[in-house]
Image: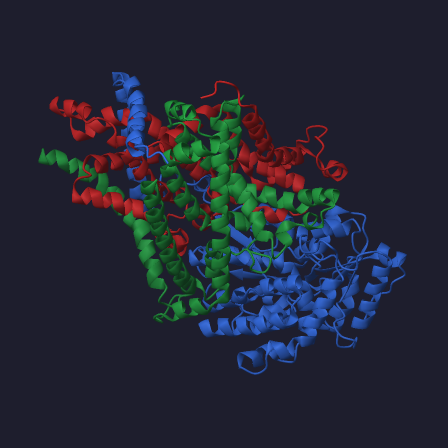
Amino acid sequence: MQKKTNWTATFLIAFGTLFILFPLYMTVSIALKTPEEMAESLFALPTGFHLSNFTKAIELTNFFQAFKNSTVITIATVLFTLLTNSMVAYAVARNRREKFFKGVYYYFISALFIPFPIIMLPIMQLTTALRMNNPSGLIVLYIVYGLAFNIFVYVGYIKSIPKELEEAAIVDGASIWGTFWRIIFPLLGPINATVGILTCLWAWNDFMLPLIILGKPEMATLPLVQFVFQGQFSTDFNLAFASYLMALSPMVILYLIAQKWVINGVTQGAVK
Amino acid sequence: MKALTETQDKQDLHNDIRGTTQMKRTIPTKQLKKKAAVFAAAGLLAAGSILSGCGAGTQAPAASPADKQGAADGGKVKLQFFQNKPEAKVSFDALIRKFNAANPGIEVTQVNVPDAETVLKVNVAKNEVPDIVGMGATDTFASLSKSGTFQDLSGHEGVKTVQPAYIDMVKKTTGTAELYGIPLTSNANGIIYNKALFAELGLTVPKTWDELMAAAEKIKTAGKVPFYHTFKDSWTTMISFNSLASNLQPENFIEDRKAGKGTFAEGYKEIAEKQLKLVELGHKDQNGKGYGDGNTAFAKGAAVMYLQGVWAIPEILKANPAIELGSVPFPASNDPAKNKLVSGVDTLLAVSKTTKHSKEAAAFVSFLLQPDNVKQLITEQKSFSAVQGVAQDDKNVTGLNAAFEDGQLVDFADHAIPGTMKIDTIIQEYYFKKDMAAYLKKLDSEWEKVQSRK
Amino acid sequence: MARQRSVFYLMTVPALLLFFTFHTIPVIQGIFYSFTNWDGFSPSYDFIGIKNYLSVFQDGDVLNSYLFTFKFAVLTTLLVNALSLLIALGLNAKIKLRQFFRGVYFLPNVLSVLIVGYIFNYLFSNVFPVWGAKTGIEALSGNLLGSMEYAWIGIVIVVVWQSLAFNSILYLAGLQTISEDLYEASSLDGAGRWREFWSITFPLIASFFTINMVLSLRSFLQVFDQIIALTGGGPGRATQSIAHLIYTGGFQGQEFAYQSANSVIYLIVIVGISFVQIAFLQKREMDM
């Protein structure tokens, strides 16, 4: 409407970013300081790079092991989620007039309203009985639990893809299977981005499932490691913050690189 | 209000957006198709193998790195040692390194988590009991023992070397003839005080409750803080509670309470009054400070006295290596002969019933019970040995030795209280709200609630 | 063609079975255990009928956790939605550096909830009180999380700080679907800002508002990570959420089945609320 820059809004939005950035500034600055510097001033910039906090934190928390665990779990989860959930959604979306598939659709959606704590205790027993209390078991759970939300998102998107493309392919003698992988899946790019990003953030940052599923300390993911080492950090906040910063960094760096893409992906999912 | 036909508009808009995105996308090239097919095939294969792998109870392809290592280093026996004290992690790590070096066929790793008892129960529920568990002789230990989690260690060679009093304490906790945990160290909680400040204010070590109150008043008039409380962490409120309740509760109070005789409202009145006195001798921010804050602040001289267990001493020294500390038993009453030191089994060693390596686990337990290793542990932790003939001669805690020598000891009162009550939160609430009637009533009502659910 | 149709079943049935195994069966198990006295690790248990349910209804701790959770969730939902709508309007206006600001506001969403909790825990203990002391406001000079009355506000602050990101982006997406022409038409009528928002903007993003309200209330009712990182449910039980009570209570001994009963009630409550919410908000959407 107005083509002029709205300075009031610019100022208010800029002011708001202070609230977002302050805790992060503190995190970085505390992670780089020595306890002596902390005593002098809380808010001043660190004088130099005290990497000793980081080396100590890496050693104490076995950072690289946890980083590897988180990475493997996240990548596998995202990959299989995209491949499997989209396929299920396609079958549901293209047959939604039929009772069975309609039922499947509502069955998944209704699971969205079931609070996690009710399955917290039984799922522990189940995963133990099936020897799934390890990273692979966790990956399976993420893929399966993702269905509830992802079917909803995918079906909305697939509905809007015209059927003519598929029909033409079927006439040419392609199978439904082939049609999905060759024609539909490639068209799902934008919504795959949405699902992929949300799944990635969930698997990377989740704390509750790893807490109750993963049995052995060497399997721990990054958030879980922060929890496990709280007691060791109690008198050395600089060490704690170095550890937090390292745990947060991979996602932040990834986000900074692909920021536009991430936000567009999430937005895409919202505008159904 | 303009009644816009917005639903229609919205639909059109959605379609517009969709349309544009799809218009730009043509059917991908052949190469891409191939890629996608390969990708999908690989994905399905992997997914299939994960699922079948789990079903068959074998390791799925994304096996944990540790398993791969296990295969690589010639099938070492791997043992998990779970212990509940964050302060002791480094000390145990050192002992574990020593053990692993001496036993190349065995590899022990330590697990130490916050809220350790809850996590331990999670593991038990998952049927994943760590091979060896180090914990206090608590209610959790008792209920795990009763449900058959641990092995009976009565026949273990180390038992003979341990003070019989501590063996009895463990058996009393579990209420069984079997011995499910071998005591390794004992602790004490009393008053830790700052020697320099004591000297500066001309204070002497208090032997009775009245002397303690007089000293506290003197500290206050000098403009200093008598006690550094850290009530943000609810468990730290147990220190003052145990110091008082263990000494002042009526004889056999808990047994009687179980039998339906007596109430907290009657038996704990004096305890509650004295608790409140201590709370009022703290500092302004005591509700907002945690254990870590307290160790650091006390090390810097923020208060004259600190109600903590001896396990806090290494943490305090970490924050200020130069500080000189003294420790005394807490004088709960005005009869010095009756004031006993609150001391319990700090760490006992239990072995899982389901461990596949009982022999190796027993070897590790024996190793920890060796006098030189116990000595190393109690020197670092400032705790006391349950193994006979190992003395604690650290100057920061020598003030407690007399009580140990004379057997002037009493077990922690809260060890007899069911964990479900979460008594620490009840006490924490009392320290915040300072409502004595409500506190005593809550102790009784929560006790009855838990008993009725059993 | 019939053979072809079977492919659709092949695509769906495995997922259905897996979901049933890992989601529905545990739900049924949870309901089943709630009628027993199982402690979670003993080899045996007995059926005790509805005794657990009767106990839950008499349990002050359960009531307390419901009160806290609802107080927290309702307030946080309102705050998050109001603020994120404002932020979205700001980001949608013609401002300088729009891309940059959009990136900053979304940043908290990529951070681990637990670690954000730990960071704020430190700020509440060691940073905010320093400011409070400097400004001389007595109420701010203590640790907010160490207060029985106000600790929950600390948790609200942290959750709002982190949840704004996602909701703002969703609202922004909604705002961007509104075409400029509508506003141009209305500005010719001389409609004020406020009128414009209520008669054009809000009705057009009403569906986003519905989704946001339902989803945020649902997730705030399940608050857990922040509680672990900030207060552990304390002081006392002042900030114990339902999820936290189920987790800690479920493992403190003799409580597994009992907390299952608590979770079943919780399930009924959440499902009920979600349906009422959807029905109510959709009706509003229609009426507008």
Residue depicted at x 86% and y 63%: B218
Q: Quadrant of the C terminus of chain A?
A: top left
Residue C262, percent from left and from top: 41, 61
Q: Quadrant of the N terminus of chain A?
A: top left
Q: Is residue B61 visible?
A: yes
Query: What colour is chain C?
Result: green
The mark tally for this picture is: 0
Residue C26, percent from left and from top: 34, 54
Residue A182, percent from left and from top: 23, 24
Residue depicted at x 62% and y 58%: B234
- The quarter holding residue B423 reads bottom right
| A99 and A252: which is toward the camera | A99
- The quarter holding residue A194 reads top left
Task: From the viewer's perspective, tell me whether residue B147 is left or right of residue B252.
Answer: left
Q: Is residue A124 visible?
A: no
The blue one among the chains is B
View extreme (bottom): residue: B261
Task: From the viewer's perspective, tell me whether residue A91 is left or right of residue C194.
Answer: left
Residue depicted at x 62% and y 77%: B265
Query: What colour is chain A?
Result: red
